[in-house]
Amino acid sequence: MKIAFSCGGTGGHIYPALAIAEKFVSAERSRSTDCFFIGSDRLEKTLVPKAGFKFFQIAASRRSVWPILRGFGQSLYIIWRQKPDIIIATGGYVTVPVILAAKLLGKKVYLQEQNILPGKVNRFLSLFAVKVFIAFAGASKYFPRNKCVLTGNPVRKDLLNAIWSKKNTKILAFGGSLSAQSINNAVFALKNKKYTDKLIHLNGKHYCHDMSEVYSRAKLCICRAGATTLSELAALGLPSILVPYPHAADNHQEFNARYFEKHGAGVVILDKDLSAASLEKTIAKIDDPTTLEKMSKAAKALSISNAAEKIAEFICR
């Protein structure tokens, strides 16, 4: 079987695709499966080849028509030339020309949706999909009837050794694969107080390729509420202070964050309310072993394990 993946823009779209691809080329399937990726010149251009997969770059744009049309033409050529059996798309606007080209060439299309509230792109593309693999049951109402399969979100295998422990001492702060200025500002100010030795701050100046190492030292995480990040926190049982990105499509990050808060796995601070003072106050409320252990168990309870395996098995059956 030959599989084309399309994803782009942020780690939240790219890492689930890589996790699924790794399952397809694992030892038990490696002899019969070949995977390659189609994306733009953003983060996927670096992460995909680093993971060992062939990468084809196309033009893409969120708004401009001409790059989309050019990307559509490039996708037609790549898919016609490479002859994949199926296409799996995990999000990002680069997937639009790829999926439309795949359907024109008569290819089977599968989508993987990470969020509780799906974006408009995936809602539109679901019309062309055989199935949509969803991370949360509540997402099914946004897609065509009988197309959804609940699998959870694929999590990178290299992270799964970093399980939360009561012995962890650090507070990890980051803004996602593309960083977040509001989190950076608040954390920089917090570091100037009494938290200098307690913080691991990934400020976006250098991309972190070993999240397993930093996760393994954290007792608490301050971060955005992208679905892939939340799936990692759930898989590891890592308590969190969540600061949803306020300009996310349809405000889906707040939907994600409120879901975690409702279940006791995290605490939400809206971006407009974020400051060193609000962070310090929130940390003070939850930074004790009993509370953190309770939050860790709540986060772990939200995790659906083996998502990538479930997706691979569904497609192969």
Image (cartoon, rainbow, N blue to C red):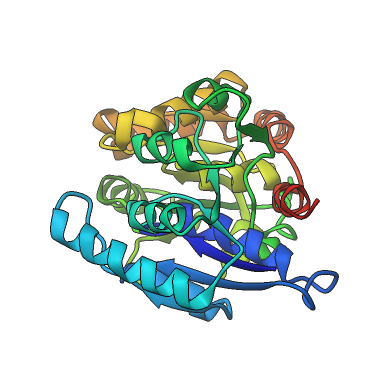
From the top left corner, tell me how far across and down residue 273 is, in percent. Answer: 28, 28
* Residue nearer the viewer, 39 or 203: 39
Query: Relative to 55, is 178 on the left or the right?
Result: left
Q: Which image quadrant is residue 281 in?
A: top left
Q: Residue at x 77, y 74 (%)?
A: 32
Query: Relative to 30, is 47 on the left or the right?
Result: left
User: Can I make out residue 50 in this image?
Assistant: yes
Query: Relative to 55, is 58 on the left or the right?
Result: left
* Residue nearer the viewer, 246 or 214: 246
User: Can I make out residue 269 in this image?
Assistant: no
* Residue nearer the viewer, 271 or 7: 7
From the top left corner, tell me how far across and down residue 160 is, in percent. Answer: 72, 57
Q: Which image quadrant is residue 70 in?
A: bottom left
Query: Relative to 217, is 245 on the left or the right?
Result: left
Q: Which image quadrant is residue 266 in?
A: top right
Q: Residue at x 64, y 60 (%)?
A: 19
* Residue nearer the viewer, 300 or 99: 99
Report the quarter where the N terminus lies: bottom right
Q: Residue at x 41, y 61 (%)?
A: 202
Q: Is residue 257 above or below residue 40?
A: above
From the top left corner, tell me how far across and down residue 199 is, in percent. Answer: 47, 55
Tally of numbered discs: 0
From the top left corner, tell me how far across and down residue 198 is, in percent. Answer: 51, 54
Q: Is residue 192 above or below residue 77?
A: above
